[in-house]
Image (cartoon, grey):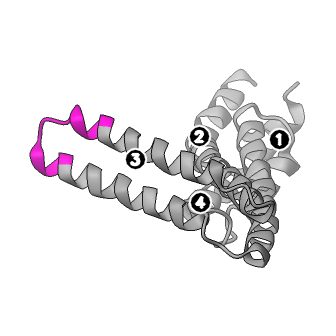
Amino acid sequence: MTSTLDEARRSLLGPSISLIVVSSLGLLLSLYYFWSALSVYFESPALTKNASKIVGRFGDIVAENEKDLEKKEILRKTMGGLESIIQSAGEMSQPAAGSSAVYMGIMSLLNGIILAGGISMLTLRLYGLSVAGSIIALIPTVGPCCILSLPFGIWALVVLSRSHIRACFNSHV
């Protein structure tokens, strides 16, 4: 039985880690945008302004440590783009901020379920949660990582559908 469990763990390692990484990134970003939308809705844009300054400064620090001038310029442009996106979040109207907060709250919840499903897949516990997280990862609007979560969700479902993998979930205690 241990060889079957080891095989199941090896088979699930790739899709579970992939879903954990993608959903963690999606969860962090959706929580940030949720918080930003709430700050705009309640007319407290200080959070958004400070966050954009932090991202800009982080980009400068990363770029300073890069020796290749071409890579340095790409890093600065990328981080500058992120900084301007964050600043524009503070310029939303109050009704738009309210609906964005609701949407990002739902996205945070869905990314949390994907994360929990990936963790349960990694530990061979709660087969239903693993399948639910994999199915939710197939929804193309869940988070900014939808392009990545789609193939990882398919991969997880293919592996989870194997009968010997399902049996390992039921017998593992």
**Magenta highlight: main SS:** helix
* Cα distance in 3D space between marks 2 and 3: 30 Å
Point out the tag, 1 or 2, that comes first from the N-terminus: 2
Point out the tag, 2 or 4, that comes first from the N-terminus: 2
Point out the tag, 1 or 4, that comes first from the N-terminus: 4
Q: Which mark lies nearer to you, 1 or 4?
A: 4
Residue at the spot of label 3? 56
* Cα distance in 3D space between marks 1 and 2: 21 Å
Q: Secondary structure at mark 3?
A: helix
Q: Is residue 39 visible?
A: yes
Q: Are marks 2 and 4 in contact (CB under 8 Å)?
A: no
For the point 52% across and 61% down, which residue is it?
Answer: 87
Residue 75: x percent and y percent? 28, 50
Decide: few, some or many residues near mark 3? Use Cα within 10 Å; few <14, some 14-19, many ≥20: many
For the point 55% across and 45% down, which residue is it?
Answer: 50
Q: Amino acid at mark 1?
A: Ala
Closer to the camera, 9 or 93?
Answer: 93
Residue at the spot of label 4? 149
Point out the tag, 2 or 3, that comes first from the N-terminus: 2
For the point 87% across and 50% down, which residue is it?
Answer: 128
